[in-house]
Image (cartoon, grey):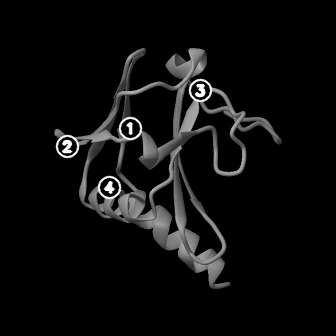
Amino acid sequence: MLEPGETRVGPTRLALERRDGGRIDIVFHHQALFGGVRDPLVLAIDGAALTLAPEQWATGEPGLPNVIAAFHILDPALAETLLARMKAGRRLTLRHDAGEAQFSLRGVTAALAAIEAQAAGVTP
């Protein structure tokens, strides 16, 4: 259980964050990336793998490149494609040179609906 003000949730975290203009940022955190994020990065949703090109991602969080053990999707078209696949999927696996991490995709659709409702000023 997190205490007030704590944000640490364990060795892995998948964050979906709405930005001005409605874009949803996709941010991956994995402690195994503590030594640095390097190619190749592979995302597999329900077994269908996609190797990310270097220009499709950046280290850290959007606007915070010094956040360690994290990377985010830069390419807006890829982010939209991933979001659609995540909504339809059950499990996402992140593979990289330091290991792999599993993320459940249960609740992604509801989470995105809540994000949009909040942005619109509506209580879900």
Q: Amino acid at mark 2?
A: Asp
* Residue 16 percent location from the top left of the image: 53, 55
The alpha-carbon separation of the residues under discs 2 and 3 comes to 24 Å
* Residue 6 percent location from the top left of the image: 77, 36
Contact between marks 4 and 1 (CB within 8 A): the answer is no
Residue 86's disc is: 4
Element type at marker 1? strand
Element type at marker 3? loop
Q: Is residue 5 left or right of residue 32?
A: right
Q: Residues within 10 Å of mark 3 (few under 14, many from 20)?
A: many
Contact between marks 3 and 4 (CB within 8 A): the answer is no
The alpha-carbon separation of the residues under discs 3 and 1 comes to 16 Å
Query: Which residue is nearer to you in this view: 61 or 122?
Result: 61
The alpha-carbon separation of the residues under discs 4 and 1 comes to 10 Å
* Residue 14 percent location from the top left of the image: 50, 43
Earlier along the polypeptide chain: callout 4 or callout 2?
2
Contact between marks 3 and 1 (CB within 8 A): the answer is no
Residue 69's disc is: 3
Q: Which residue is mark 1?
A: 103
Q: Is residue 43 left or right of residue 14?
A: left
Element type at marker 2? loop
Looking at the image, is mark 3 or mark 4 nearer the viewer? Answer: 3
> Residue at 82% of width from left, 41% of height from top?
4
Q: Is residue 124 visible?
A: no
- Residue 17 sits in which quadrant? bottom right
Earlier along the polypeptide chain: callout 1 or callout 2?
2
Q: Amino acid at mark 4?
A: Met
Element type at marker 4? helix
* Residue 53 percent location from the top left of the image: 36, 41
Q: Which residue is mark 2?
A: 46
Q: Amino acid at mark 3?
A: Ala
Earlier along the polypeptide chain: callout 3 or callout 4?
3
